[in-house]
């Protein structure tokens, strides 16, 4: 999954056109590999079952070995922002866009930041039920999980 | 062994001009602030044996700055990686170095040049670490993180845009009397509400003013301070808190901040309480940082900050004067060390038009989200 600068597509004259690209490391690489296969997988302790985000090589509670396990992909909007200005590259044509902290159903407090799609920003609320779907990250090398309201609005 | 910071004092303060774009190096500005801080307390480079700063890897280091102002043999040099979250640890660490005999006179500084602007990251094309999960979604910079906190507070406690505006308006009103502030034009609540969205629920006037500049303070022992020109400003106690490895996404309750843990620790160590504080230099990278931490430190209940500010309780003649210099929102963002400068000025009684009359204690907070700290200064050793 890891790419080099040379392999990345040129951003040409507009350096703002692509969102920041992830740089997987030895611990996080399985997260990105799973997404490339259309699965959302999170780091979990093989001994005590604790979910860990960001991922760790060893469990912070029991020091047990960790692995990545698929999650249901359902969760709740814990909080969210509506981004009106370009302060980070990418999604310039999508302004204003919504980013939420999605609390996954697997464990209280287990959260992922993600864009919320398929809804008017004015309709997003804390507590909104959402489900993951997969989208190509502009740039061509990665897949990301975005979230869409479960019941429509 | 002493379990407190009593016995250490701030004796000198210095700073460079605060400007939007200086064209200067961080070494130049830090050296200027350090020289001014030493001149302020009648010391010279020959008296200095300790230097420390905090940074995000964006500034000249302590040994360089010490050398630049003429220190030949620096005995204690500590460069700390961190931002607003680490200011208290850095100042308290300097005091601890003095109290433990590792150094006698320590300069603490922070400098920010034009290459550092935290509010935008338009040049970021790759992100590693925890940022790799957020950056690809267009979520990477502090105004976004703390807008996320703010939204949750609004959801849980019903706080409003007008409540945030009350903080912005009050701080700007204070900055009018501060010639060193970069933003001195008064604003109204309408101005606040009409300012453009940045990361909703944050508008432009929720965000601090990022600038170039440096601040330095000189820390030494209370014994030595007694021989120096100014009324010493004593450290009465400090406390820090860190949870979730600093992760703003995983911090358990976004309606509050590190101060939830720091406040009881600080009040316990100092034997003080909010009613004892005359000046509160609240770290204000954003208006909401003031709101959350002000509640956590116990000045008012959750959800009541807006009413508190509107009632005039956070300004002259009220309960406590919050950021008499205008804070990071209006004086400018020197990563919170300018709060220490202001606290010292107020406790010396040298704040001029904006002097808080009879100021004897100042709370200085630093940081936001899952980590930060706070300390209390006093005119008399506890
Ligand atoms: Zn475990």
Image: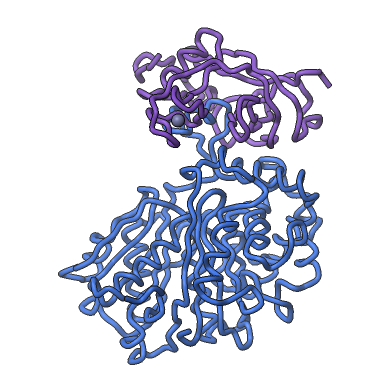
Instruction: Name the spot of residue A9 as percent of width and height, x first.
Output: 44, 14
In front of the other: B21 or B287: B287
Compared to residue B138, the image places residue B310 above or below, namely below
Q: Which chain is blue?
A: B
> Seen in the image, is B85 located left or right of residue B298?
left
Instruction: Name the spot of residue A136 as percent of width and height, x first.
Output: 56, 13
> Seen in the image, is B347 located left or right of residue A58?
right
How many numbered circles are shown? 0
Q: Which chain is purple?
A: A
Q: Quadrant of the N terminus of chain B?
A: bottom left
Colouring rule applied to residues:
by chain
Instruction: Name the spot of residue B253 as percent of width and height, x first.
Output: 64, 45
Q: Farthest residue toward the top?
A: A37
Q: Farthest residue toward the right?
A: A153
At 37% across and 81% down in the image, what residue appears? Answer: B7
- Quadrant for residue A29, please give it: top left
Compared to residue B200, the image places residue B36 above or below, namely below
At 55% across and 42% down in the image, what residue appears? Answer: B248
Compared to residue A10, the image places residue A100 above or below, namely below
Quadrant of ligand 1 in image:
top left
- Quadrant for residue A146, please give it: top right
In front of the other: A50 or B7: A50
At 50% across and 52% down in the image, what residue appears? Answer: B371
Instruction: Name the spot of residue A77 as percent of width and height, x first.
Output: 70, 31
Q: Farthest residue toward the left?
A: B73
> Seen in the image, is B190 located left or right of residue A58?
right
At 41% across and 51% down in the image, what residue appears? Answer: B82
Compared to residue B73, the image places residue A61 above or below, namely above
């Amino acid at each position: 999954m890891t790419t080099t600068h040379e392999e990345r597509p040129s951003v040409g004259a507009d350096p703002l056109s692509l969102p920041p690209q992830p740089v997987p490391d030895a611990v996080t690489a399985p997260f990105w590999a799973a997404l490339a296969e259309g699965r959302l997988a999170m780091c979990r302790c093989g001994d005590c079952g604790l979910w860990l985000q960001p991922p760790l090589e060893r469990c912070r509670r029991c020091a047990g070995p960790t692995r990545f396990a698929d999650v249901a992909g359902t969760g709740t909007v814990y909080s969210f922002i509506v981004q009106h200005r370009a302060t980070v590259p990418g999604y310039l044509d999508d302004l204003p866009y919504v980013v939420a902290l999605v609390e996954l159903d697997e464990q209280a407090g287990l959260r992922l930041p993600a864009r919320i799609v398929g809804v008017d920003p004015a309709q997003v609320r804390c507590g909104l039920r959402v489900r993951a779907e997969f989208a190509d990250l502009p740039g061509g090398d990665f897949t990301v999980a975005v979230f869409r309201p479960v019941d429509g609005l | 062994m002493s379990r407190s910071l009593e016995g250490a004092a701030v004796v000198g303060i210095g700073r460079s001009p605060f400007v939007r774009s200086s064209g200067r190096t961080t070494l130049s500005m830090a050296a200027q602030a350090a020289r001014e801080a030493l001149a302020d307390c009648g010391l010279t480079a020959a008296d200095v044996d300790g230097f420390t700063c905090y940074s995000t890897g964006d500034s000249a280091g302590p040994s360089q700055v010490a050398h630049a102002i003429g220190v030949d043999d620096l005995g204690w040099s500590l460069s700390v990686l961190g931002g607003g979250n680490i200011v208290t640890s850095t100042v308290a660490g300097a005091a601890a170095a003095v109290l433990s005999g590792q150094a006698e006179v320590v300069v603490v500084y922070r400098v920010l040049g034009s290459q550092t602007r935290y509010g935008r990251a338009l040049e970021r094309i790759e992100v590693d670490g925890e940022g790799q999960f957020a950056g690809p979604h267009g979520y990477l910079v502090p105004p976004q993180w703390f807008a996320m906190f703010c939204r949750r507070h609004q959801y849980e406690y019903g706080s409003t845009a007008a409540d945030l505006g009350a903080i912005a308006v009050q701080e700007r009103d204070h900055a009018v009397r501060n010639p060193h502030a970069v933003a001195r034009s008064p604003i109204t609540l309408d101005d606040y509400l009409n300012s453009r969205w940045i990361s909703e629920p944050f508008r432009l006037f929720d965000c601090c003013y990022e600038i170039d500049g440096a601040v330095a303070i000189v820390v030494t022992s209370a014994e030595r301070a007694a021989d120096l020109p100014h009324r010493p400003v004593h450290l009465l106690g400090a406390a820090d808190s860190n949870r979730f490895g600093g992760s703003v996404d995983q911090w358990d309750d976004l309606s509050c901040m590190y101060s939830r843990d720091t406040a009881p620790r600080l009040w316990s160590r100092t034997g003080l309480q909010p009613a004892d504080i005359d000046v509160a230099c609240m770290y204000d990278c954003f208006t909401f940082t003031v709101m959350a931490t002000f509640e956590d430190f116990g000045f008012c209940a959750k959800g009541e900050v807006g009413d508190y500010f509107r009632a005039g309780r956070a300004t002259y003649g009220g309960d406590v004067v919050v950021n008499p210099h205008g804070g990071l929102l209006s004086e400018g963002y020197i990563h919170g060390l300018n709060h220490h400068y202001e606290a010292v000025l107020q406790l010396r009684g040298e704040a001029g038009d904006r002097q808080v009359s009879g100021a004897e204690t100042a709370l200085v907070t630093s940081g936001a989200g899952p980590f930060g700290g706070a300390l209390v200064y006093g005119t008399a050793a506890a």
